[in-house]
Image (cartoon, grey):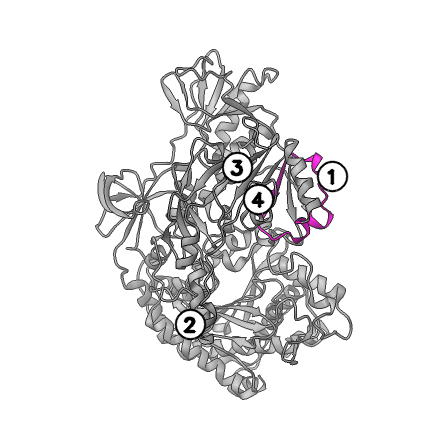
């Protein structure tokens, strides 16, 4: 690293203010000898901005825990004076502003500390900013560096505060030391325990939502996401591993090699170990390297050995002492090296960036139809990404159907249309194509994410042009019904999360709400199973019944139907026993050791920010089945639950369910009850092979893919007469991440299942793994005494982007109440 800093000094042609303090001088300790807190970083960057005209420092948002989200712009004073001109010229060349241009300034974006406990990068951000200002003016003459020094302040401070509390002085390098073993949930995720490096495309978290407008405002040519990995891997930088998505251009691949070679030059000088082209591929679109790549940039992740285990210093398995000082130095070196190589190639970067957007993608029009709330939710996501869309004026169109995987013809008037004929055509293709071409199934993440499946929308794709309009036909459709003289009640639809938030608002207002287990018919109008029913008789004491329902319907834009009589057309009257009361359940959700922090975090975020319904978090360390009398529903997020597998704990859970409780097990949590007495759940074991020991050592990893499912979309058949599937059609597309499979329930209800061989519609599934899923159930209910076990074997809330799975969870909470048949 010393050589690169000496080189910067030799190249420096302009002195900077002597009042600029180094991080060590400002903080009072050398970088890497202590963990800095987020507010110290903010103060240091404010100092730089006040002391130098080479840097400006801004706030672009705020976290859930009220920490600021900031960015710095570092370039020469001359460029600082014309930043808006540079920014607009960049957008003009790619068609995102009117006109054209051929700029010669490279825009490099450096993102640090997206994972809070990968903590060397925020320290490196301060040192990198100082070195850029102090010694690299030649690079900055034609380069603008945008720096986000801490993408995840809440996770960063969770880790730094913990380490500063427990770390010994001097640090203890032994792996057994407490300072190398973070408690649950660790500092990696944000406040809601989301992995922000999987949230770029889905934008479910406030950090992502506030960052995206700034990113699109600048559209950088190079983006680096600084990370840490296990303590035994030295340092990873580009070029990336395969698979690459096919929209990635030869130039993007080649310049990754050039950047890697430039990084390698400095690492070789220092004798630092590194590796390239392993593990970290460019496929899944929601990473900090792939999302920028699909927007034309050279997107990369840099991975330093370390993470939350490393502390200030640790002995790795090879006996090498890895220090925070070294980790920060490595990240500083690659950050400066990336700016250097980008500056040297500024003209080429601009030329290829322009070509990426100006070269047309093969024409594909994705035509989406379905629930209007889901359409609106999708357009909100598209707006976040500034992706253009329109609505079909054509009537009958022939195209390839996502649900049948065959060519078909249907009326598509008013359908949402996404076209690749736009500046972001490549991103449209990546997000909406049914299946990404896969050159290698050994990937770092899921291999399927197609948004039509995720949102539960029907989709046709055609390569023929369509007549479309910018007028959104879904706007202005809401109308409150006329107010009849006599109001017996109201019926509201059930088919989307928007209906669920209407329900929870009604319950929180103290209103009694029902749902229908049978189709309804009133005044010649039909209502499907699951429809919400709010009767005046149930709420007779509410003097504000009629105006309150209408007000809440207006707030939630719910198309309610007012009934002047409870007498039905089909015999299911408002007082029918087929219209069940929805209880305002007391819900407990497990968290802590044995629970996936990501799964719990997704549920926590869903309950607070989307469903807006109260719940009680219960830490597994304090869990006792004796406390369950305070709850009606217990949710077990995905996890292994080693402390809940004893006979005593399982019997306690069983007794609580028998007495009327409802237990909802999600994903890996289902396995807790598999093959245990009294839970009705039997796992399917893979067929054994006695030839595996004859596979050559070098071939075993490749051979193992036959047992893998790397995030694949499967067609699941649903029993739509069961409350768990209310609001769904008979086919559901589920995101399956493993080959865990269970025999169909003998005495329960197989609500979602594979009818014969399992059919994968998108993503990779190994042959043996796929075979194992045949004739298994995916979602089911097992009534037990007066209560019920609900098994959701797939993560229906995965990363909160699998929108069409969310209603399963709500149905589990409120619709499924096993009091019709008792199986015990």
In this view, the mark in front (3 or 2): 3
The residue that mark 4 highlights is: 665
Q: Is residue 192 left or right of residue 219?
A: right
Answer whether residue 636 is magenta in the image: yes
Q: Position of residue 790 (x, y in %)?
A: 55, 39
> Could you say where residue 223 lies in the image, as x and y percent from the top left?
46, 68
| Distance (Cα) linking label 3 and label 1 | 24 Å
Q: Are marks 1 and 2 in contact (CB under 8 Å)?
A: no
Judging by the rendered image, the residue that carries numbered circle 2 is 106
* Residue 781: mark in rendering: 3
Task: Name the image quarter holding residue 36.
Answer: bottom right
169 lies above or below 94: below
Q: Is residue 484 magenta?
A: no
- As helix, strand or loop, the secondary structure at mark 2 comes to strand
**3D distance between C-alphas at marks 3 and 2:** 57 Å
Q: Earlier in the sequence, mark 4 or mark 3?
A: 4
Residue designated by label 1: 626
């Amino acid at each position: 690293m010393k050589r690169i800093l000496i080189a910067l000094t030799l190249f420096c042609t302009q002195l900077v203010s002597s009042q600029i303090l180094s991080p060590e001088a400002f903080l009072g300790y050398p970088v890497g000898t202590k963990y800095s807190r987020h507010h110290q970083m903010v103060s240091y960057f404010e100092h730089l901005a006040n002391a130098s005209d080479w840097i400006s420092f801004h706030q672009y948002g705020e976290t859930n825990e009220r920490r600021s989200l900031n960015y710095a712009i570092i370039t020469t004073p001359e460029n600082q004076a014309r930043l808006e001109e540079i920014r607009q010229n960049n957008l003009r060349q790619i068609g995102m502003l009117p006109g054209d241009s051929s700029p010669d300034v490279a825009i490099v974006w450096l993102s640090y500390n997206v994972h809070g406990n990968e903590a060397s990068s925020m320290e490196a951000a301060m040192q990198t900013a100082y070195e850029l200002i102090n010694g690299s003016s030649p690079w900055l003459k034609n380069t603008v560096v945008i720096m986000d020094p801490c993408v995840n302040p809440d996770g960063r401070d969770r880790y730094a505060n913990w380490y500063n509390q427990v770390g010994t002085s001097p640090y203890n390098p032994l792996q057994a030391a407490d300072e190398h073993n973070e408690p649950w949930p660790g500092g990696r995720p944000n406040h809601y325990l989301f992995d922000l490096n999987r949230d770029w495309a889905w934008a479910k978290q406030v950090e992502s939502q506030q960052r995206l407008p700034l990113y699109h405002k600048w559209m950088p040519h190079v983006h680096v996401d600084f990370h840490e990995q296990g303590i035994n891997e030295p340092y990873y930088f580009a070029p990336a591993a395969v698979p690459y998505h096919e929209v990635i251009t030869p130039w993007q691949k080649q310049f990754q090699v050039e950047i890697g070679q430039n990084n390698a030059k400095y690492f070789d000088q220092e004798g630092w170990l590194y590796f390239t082209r392993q593990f970290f591929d460019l496929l899944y679109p929601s990473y900090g390297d792939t999302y920028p790549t699909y927007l034309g940039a050279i997107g990369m992740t840099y991975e330093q050995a370390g993470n939350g285990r490393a502390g200030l210093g640790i002995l790795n398995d090879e006996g090498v002492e890895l220090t925070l000082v070294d980790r920060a130095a490595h990240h500083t070196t690659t950050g400066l090296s990336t700016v250097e190589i980008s500056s040297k190639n500024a003209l080429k970067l601009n030329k290829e960036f322009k070509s990426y957007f100006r070269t047309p993608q093969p024409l594909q029009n994705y035509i989406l139809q379905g629930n209007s709330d889901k359409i609106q939710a999708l357009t909100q996501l598209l707006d976040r990404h500034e992706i253009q869309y329109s609505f079909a004026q054509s009537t009958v169109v022939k195209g390839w159907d996502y649900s049948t995987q065959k060519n078909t013809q249907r009326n598509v008037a008013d359908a949402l249309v996404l076209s690749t004929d736009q500046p972001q055509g490549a991103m449209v293709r990546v997000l909406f194509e049914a299946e990404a071409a896969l050159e290698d199934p050994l990937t770092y993440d899921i291999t399927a994410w197609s948004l039509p499946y995720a949102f539960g929308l029907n989709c046709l794709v055609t390569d023929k042009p369509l007549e479309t309009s910018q007028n959104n036909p879904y706007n202005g459709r809401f109308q409150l019904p006329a107010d009849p003289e006599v109001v017996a009640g109201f019926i509201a639809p059930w088919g989307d999360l928007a209906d669920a938030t209407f329900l929870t608002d009604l319950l929180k207002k103290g209103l009694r709400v029902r749902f229908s287990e049978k189709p309804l018919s009133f005044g010649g109008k039909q209502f499907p199973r699951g429809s919400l029913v709010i009767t005046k008789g149930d709420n007779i004491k509410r003097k504000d019944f009629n105006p309150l329902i209408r007000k809440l319907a207006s707030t939630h834009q719910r198309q309610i139907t007012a009934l002047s009589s409870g007498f039905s057309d089909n015999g299911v009257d408002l007082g029918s026993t087929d219209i069940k009361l929805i209880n305002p359940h007391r819900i407990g959700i497990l968290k802590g050791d044995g629970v996936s922090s990501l799964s719990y975090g997704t549920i926590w975020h869903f309950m607070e920010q989307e469903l807006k319904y109260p719940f009680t978090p219960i830490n597994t360390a304090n869990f006792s089945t004796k406390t369950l009398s305070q709850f009606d529903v217990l949710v077990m997020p995905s996890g292994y639950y080693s402390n809940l597998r004893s006979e005593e704990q399982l019997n306690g859970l069983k007794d609580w369910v028998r007495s009327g409780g409802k237990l909802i097990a999600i994903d890996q949590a289902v396995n807790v009850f598999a093959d245990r007495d009294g839970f009705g759940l039997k796992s399917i074991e893979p067929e054994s092979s006695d030839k595996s020991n004859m596979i050559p050592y070098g071939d075993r990893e490749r051979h193992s893919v036959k047992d893998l499912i790397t995030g694949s979309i499967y067609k699941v058949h649903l029993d739509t007469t069961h409350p768990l599937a209310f609001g769904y059609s008979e086919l559901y597309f589920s995101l399956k991440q493993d080959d865990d499979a269970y025999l169909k329930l003998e005495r329960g209800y197989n609500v979602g299942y594979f009818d014969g061989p399992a059919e994968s519609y998108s993503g990779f599934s190994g042959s043996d793994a796929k075979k194992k899923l045949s004739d298994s159930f995916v979602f089911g209910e097992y009534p037990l005494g007066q209560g019920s076990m609900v098994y959701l074997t797939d993560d229906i809330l995965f990363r909160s982007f699998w929108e069409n799975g969310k209603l399963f969870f709500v149905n589990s909470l409120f619709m499924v109440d096993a009091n019709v048949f008792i199986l015990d």
